[in-house]
Image: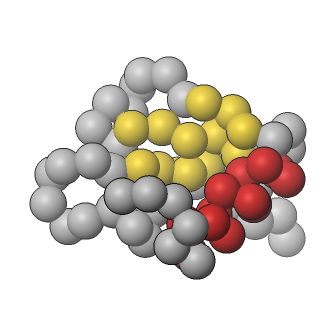
C-alpha cells in the first residue's frame, strides 16, 4: 500500500501563528518546503542530502539563533 503524501508542520514551528514551516513527505524528487501561512504559494525543493544535513544541524543546535 502506497504511503499518502501530505504536508506536515515542522516540529520546530511554534503553536502561535508566527513562522511556520511545512514539509511534503514522500516527494519523488526532493524535499519540498513551504510557508504554512501561504499554502498556495511557492515551495522550495531541496535535494535529500543537503536537507538531511540541515535537519541534523538544527537538531544539534549548530546553527546560530
Q: Nearer the viewer, residue 4 or 61?
A: 61
Assign the N terminus to one quadrant of the image: bottom right
**Residue at (50% x, 22% y) in the render:** 42
Q: Nearer the viewer, residue 11 or 60?
A: 60
How many numbered circles are shown? 0
State the image quarter where residue 56 is shown.
bottom right
- Image position, residue 63 (x, y; %): 51, 60
Residue 9 shows up from this direction: no
Q: Nearer the viewer, residue 53 or 36?
A: 53
State the image quarter where residue 29 is shown.
top right
- Image position, residue 45 (x, y; %): 69, 33
Residue 6 shows up from this direction: yes
41 on left or right of 38: right
Please say which color scheme the image uses: secondary structure
- Image position, residue 13 (x, y; %): 33, 62
**Residue at (43% x, 71% y) in the render:** 11
Residue reaching furthest bottom? 60
40 on left or right of 55: left
44 on left or right of 41: right
Assign the C terminus to one quadrant of the image: bottom left
**Residue at (32% x, 30% y) in the render:** 38
**Residue at (40% x, 67% y) in the render:** 12
- Image position, residue 25 (x, y; %): 67, 56
State the image quarter where residue 57 is shown.
bottom right
Amino acid at each position: 500500500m502506497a504511503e499518502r503524501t501530505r504536508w506536515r508542520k515542522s516540529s520546530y514551528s511554534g503553536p502561535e501563528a508566527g513562522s511556520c514551516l511545512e514539509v511534503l513527505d514522500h516527494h519523488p524528487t526532493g524535499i519540498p518546503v513551504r510557508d504554512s501561512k501561504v499554502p498556495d504559494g511557492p515551495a522550495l525543493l531541496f535535494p535529500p542530502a543537503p536537507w538531511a544535513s540541515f535537519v541534523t544541524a538544527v537538531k544539534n543546535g549548530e546553527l546560530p539563533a
